[in-house]
Image (cartoon, rainbow, N blue to C red):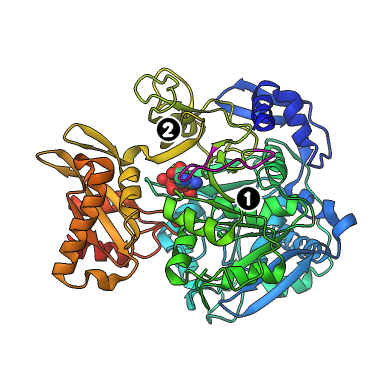
Amino acid sequence: MQTLREFHRRSLQERDPFWREQAAFVHWETPFERVLDDSRLPFARWFVGGRTNLCHNAVDRWLPEQADAPALIWVSTEVDQEETYTRAQLHKEVNAAAAMLVAQGVGRGDRVLIYMPMIPQAVFMMLACARIGAIHSVVFGGFASVNLAQRIDDAAPKVVVSADAGSRGGKVTPYKPLLDRALDLATQKPASVIIVDRGLAPFTPVQGRDLDYQALRARHDGAQAPVAWLESSEPSYVLYTSGTTGKPKGVQRDTGGYAVALASSMRHVFNGKPGDTFFCTSDIGWVVGHSYIVYGPLIGGQATVLYEGTPVRPDGAILWRLVERFGVNTLFSAPTAVRVLKKQDPQCLRRHDLSSLRAVYLAGEPLDEPTARWIAGELGKPIIDNYWQTESGWPILSAQPGVEAVPTRFGSPSFPVYGFDARIVSESTGEDLPAGQKGVVAIVPPLPPGAMSTIWGDDARFVQTYFTSIPGRQVYSSFDWGRVDEDGYWFILGRTDDVINVAGHRLGTREIEESISSHTGVAECAVVGVADELKGQVAMAFVVLKSPEQAETREQADALEGDIMRVVQDQLGAVARPARIRFVPALPKTRSGKVLRRAIVALCEGRDPGDLTTIEDPQTLEQIKETL
Ligand code: ATP
Ligand code: MG
């Protein structure tokens, strides 16, 4: 703990030497002149004047030691295929992909929109963009046309790269018709569209616009695309937030700061070393996928597993089978995946040799105690809860906040990661709050290397959105509530707009959810505050049961509702007891696995559910409506 505190302290107070050390994990073609330019806060420029390249650091730089070692391992349980690319093969594919883009007139600073399933070509194209200094905007494969059109217009890409189709849970989604419609809607039309034809869904190419990936690949076989050495602050990509609390925001990331943050975090937060195998089950459409499927592991000299499939198909042991087969050292997933596995087959971990695995990292949403207990108990290895945002680019809080893991506390992602000057501040005065008090999780600028540089194309909105909500103080607001306990452990208590006010009592929906989840029959739940004439707001709970038969009849449902109410009353008091509990087959979630509480609230209050661009399954909203 001593080392750890010292590490964190140095990252803030001895910033220059500290970040110089971290920057040494990265190859700089031209050394930087200054570690930080903070003359225009909240805008920060890291490693000013240095020139580097993400693709070079991820691929070329490891060729001397690792040319023949696996770099990208692709497994698809959707189409039953598997491919392994060594670093040299990856280098070849990325060069060919980069040459394809160059031939289409793409150059430094141009945008390329990537709308693809989890296939190797998606990774080749991301790295190809980085190689030539083009800015990628990856849009989650299968997103609806309207959202895709918005992102096309926002980025104004020269080229769009896509595929005929993706597949999820055994169901093929044709992407091409979605893309065609989006391109009709968009005003910023790309010059060309490159399509990977997987043979999953027949389509008719648009003459003069659509190009076939494999045909171009053959034409550029063996091509070399020179690396563009970017100044550290030049943008690497744009990526949108999940849209859980509103309209998604286009996060812009730099190059040098991001390279350093990832390279450094692979060592200090993920405890890895070159030659390891890293398996992150996220999607390339999300920040976790950008940072820890594609760039982080490759920059850290590790092999990365790219998995097209779900955690439950063909069965609930698939992730563990892959860990065993590829000797995975670090697994990075989300609490929602663990909850699904626990519900499916609680014995699934015991049948596999997981000796290669050192730790499991979980992020994206609160890790509830029953889930944490189950996975920790089954695995007997560290479970590292880590808290972050699309904006931060890498973990803000972690049970391995730098150099070493800490003894964990259930429900807590432990401590601030080095580089992040995180505070709990009062939403009314902006002051730092003492231990035990609940406030807004904020970060004192400068945001560390790797965090967002601005909102794409809108500096004013960046400042306005993130740095003006706390009165009297220019700090970054995470829009999450948090609390620190007496020993310095951090707890995330939900979104700032998820606090409800019942007859003058302020309650965090997260606390009520935790309490409901402790009932043994509950698989997961969402609690929302709904406007009420008498009390201001009341809490409504939507619960997914482990076995839905438990609430099949009216009497059973009523009895169970009463049971759960009592649990909440015993743990949190009568005011926290939800006004109603409804049982549903599934909760509405974003494609990144987050519960869309604002849409539930809207339905409960008889309003339009608002921006649903990122919803996974619209039917879940219908199911909620039916219970009301
Ligand atoms: P939007 O900003 O568009 O509303 P979003 O905030 O859901 O969407 P992301 O950046 O994907 O978009 O998610 C970040 C949020 O996820 C955090 O602000 C936090 O609420 C939640 N989160 C992430 N990791 C954790 C964690 N380990 N524990 C608790 N909450 C987490
Ligand atoms: Mg957010």
Pointer 1 local density, CA inside 10 Å: few below 14, some 14–19, many at least 20: many
Q: Residue furthest right?
A: 64
Q: Which residues are magenta?
A: 402-414
The chief SS type of the magenta part is: loop
Is 163 positioned to the left or the right of 259 in the image? Answer: left
Gap in angstroms between the C-alphas marked 2 and 1: 27 Å
Which residue bears the numbered disc 2? 483
**Tag 2: Cα neighbours inside 10 Å, few (<14), some, or many (≥20)?**
many
For label 2, the SS is strand
**Could you say which disc has been placed on residue 326 in the image?**
none
Farthest residue toward the left? Answer: 534
Decide which of 236, 334 is in the foreground and name it.
Answer: 334
First-in-chain label (2 vs 1): 1
Marks 2, 1: nearer the viewer: 2
Residue 291 - label: 1
Rendered position, 318 above or below 528: below
Disc 1 secondary structure class:
helix
In the image, the residue with mark 2 has its CB under 8 Å from the nearest atom of ligand 1 = no
**How far across and down, in percent of the image, does residue 58 sit?**
76, 52
Q: Residue at x 60, y 51 (%)?
A: 382
Q: Quadrant of residue 12?
A: top right
Seen in the image, is 82 located left or right of residue 184?
Answer: right
Query: Looking at the image, can residue 156 be seen?
Result: no
Residue 375, position as x, y percentages in the image: 52, 59
Q: At label 2, which amino acid type do we have?
A: Arg
Image quarter of the N terminus: top right
Looking at the picture, tell me which residue is in the foreground, 399 or 306: 399
